[in-house]
Amino acid sequence: MTREKTAEMTAEEITAGEMQVTTGIQYPADKVREGLKTLVASGRLSEEEADLVFWYYSYGQDNRFTYKQLGEAIGMSQTVAYHIVKSDYQASYRNIIPEIAKLKKHVEEDSKRKAIGFVETRTSGEIFRACESALYDHMPTFIYGASQIGKTTALLEFQRTHNHGTTRYIRMGSKWSKPRFVEELAIVCKCYSKSSRTADLERRICGSLSERNLLIIDEFHLALFATSESNSREIMEFVRELFDRTGCAPVFSGTPVAAQEFEAGRYAKMFDQLRRRGLVKVVLPNVPPVKDINTFARSFDLPVPSGTVLAGIKDMLRSSGLGKFVKYLQKSYALAKAAGKELDWETFMAVTNGYASLASARNEY
C-alpha cells in the first residue's frame, strides 16, 4: 500500500482510515500546528521538518486536494496522508520527509516556469491537418518526424480538443506483445476488464470504435523495432483489422527510421494494403522552421532572434530538437524572474553556453 509498511497499524485501523479520508481535507490548521509541536517536543521531528510537513498540509489545502490526492503527491496512500495531517502517523518519518522535500522543490521550480500553454506552430498545424484528414476522410495516416520536434505535444493537444468521445490516443511501449497492446488499448477505449481474455478484449475494442473515431498510435516505431518480429506483425495486423472492421482510421506517428522498414521492408505488404484503402503520409522537417522559432520567442515575450543568436538556436534544434530549446527558454525565464528583470536573448545564451560548458567539462580527479 505504501513504500513503508505501517506495521504499528492494524488492518482494521487502516480500513477505517481509508473510509474516513475520501471527502477532502477538513482538519483545521491550528490542530495541525498543535500536533506538529507535540512531534517536535517528542523528538520525532525537527523544527525544520515540522515546517515542511505544515507546508505539505497547506499545499493540499491550497489545491483543494482530497487525502487521496495529497498522498499521491508523495507516492503514498490516502491513509498515510491522513495520519500525517493528524500528526498520529505511527511509523517512522524517515521516508516521508525526503518525499515532501522533493515535492516542495518541484512545486517551487514549477512556479518559476512561464505558463505558455500549447503553442501553435507550423509543425503542429501539419499534424492537425493530417489527423483531421484521418478522422473525417477515414484514411490511415502516417506521420514521420525526428524526436523532440513536437509530435507528441501536438497529438495530445489534438486528442484533448477532439476528445468528446472521438479521439483515442495510445503511446506504444518498448517490447510490447500483442496481448499487452490489446490491454492498453482496451483501457484507452474504456472497455478493459481484468478477467477478460485477449480475444474478448479485442471484441470489446471493436465494439467501442466506429468510423466516427480516430485512433492515434504514437511512437509506433517501437512496435517495429523494440519487440520481436512476430509481436510486431501481430500488433500491426490487429490495427489493420480494427480499421477494416470498424472504419476507425489509425494515425501512426513515429521517427523516420520506421519509414524504410514499413514501406519497403518487412511490413511493406501491410503498408501496401493500407495504401490501397487510401493513405496520408506526412514527413516533418528534422529542424523546425524559423517561423516556429519566432512563435516560441513571442510566447516568452522575446523579440525575433537574429544573427549569432538565431544561428545558435538552429544548431541546438539540429542536434537536440525543439524540446531542449523550450527547456532552455524556461530556465532562462526562471533566472531572469529571480533577478527581477525581463527575459532577453543575452540571458538565454548565457544559459545555453553554461550548459554546454558543463557538458564538456572533464573530471579532473
Image (tube, rainbow, N blue to C red):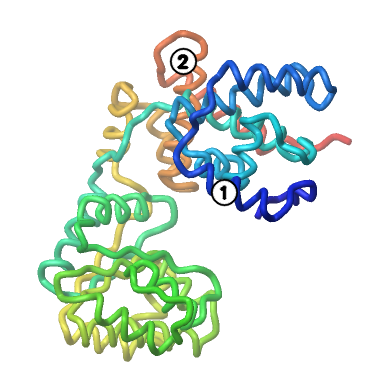
Residue 274 drawn above or below residue 291: below
Q: Earlier in the sequence, mark 1 or mark 2?
A: 1
206, 35: nearer the viewer: 35
Tell me: 208 left or right of 332.
Answer: left
Label 2's element?
A: helix
- Indicate the position of residue 263 as horizontal and vertical percent values: 34, 81
Q: Amino acid at mark 1?
A: Glu
Position of residue 125 measured from the top left corner of the image (x, y, whole percent): 20, 50
Q: What residue lies at 61% left-to-right and 41% top-to-bottom?
A: 74
* Residue 277 numbered tag: none
Which of the image's four quarters has the C terminus? top right
Q: Quadrant of residue 330?
A: top left
Q: Residue at x 73, y 52 (%)?
A: 10
**1 and 2 marks in contact (CB < 8 Å):** no
Query: Within 10 Å of the Cα at label 2, are there few (<14), some (14-19), or many (20+) other Cα atoms?
Result: some
- Residue ID for mark 1: 18
Q: Nearer the viewer, residue 209 or 69?
A: 69
Per the rendering, the mark at residue 337 is 2
Considering only vertical position in the picture, is 64 above or below 73?
above
